[in-house]
Amino acid sequence: MMTVRRWRRWLRDQRGIETARQACSDAQKKLDQASDLAARAEQLIENNGFAEAIERTMRRRWAQ
């Protein structure tokens, strides 16, 4: 049988664990969203030739 003091400590620990699990879940969702955005950005850059245009411009600037 738990004493009141032990029960309160156990309850506080459980709340902390739930808070940490929620924070971890939120962070994972944000990481997944960021990964999706990065993949989409890479796809758009490849599709419109933006990276090649920047590369050509930089080569011209540094060639002088």
Image: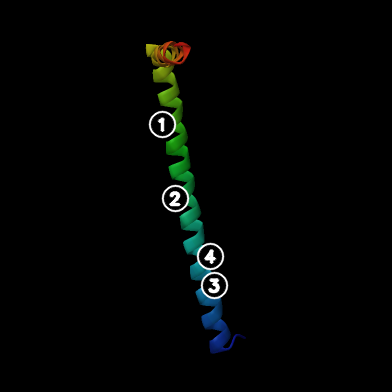
Mark 4 vs 3: CB contact within 8 A: yes
Cα distance between the residues tagged 3 and 1: 36 Å
For residue 37, which numbered disc appears in the image? 1
Task: Say what secondary structure mark 3 lies in.
Answer: helix
Which kind of residue does numbered mark 4 sit on?
Answer: Ile
Q: Position of residue 59 (x, y in %)?
A: 46, 12
Name the residue that disc number 4 marks: 17
Task: Say what secondary structure mark 1 lies in.
Answer: helix
Q: Is 29 located above or below residue 1 in the figure? A: above
Seen at 41% across and 31% down, the residue is 37
**Which of pointers 3 and 1 lies earlier in the amino acid sequence?**
3
Mark 3 vs 2: CB contact within 8 A: no
Q: Quadrant of the N terminus?
A: bottom right
Name the residue that disc number 2 marks: 26
Q: Nearer the viewer, residue 62 or 23?
A: 62
Name the residue that disc number 3 marks: 13
Cα distance between the residues tagged 2 and 4: 14 Å
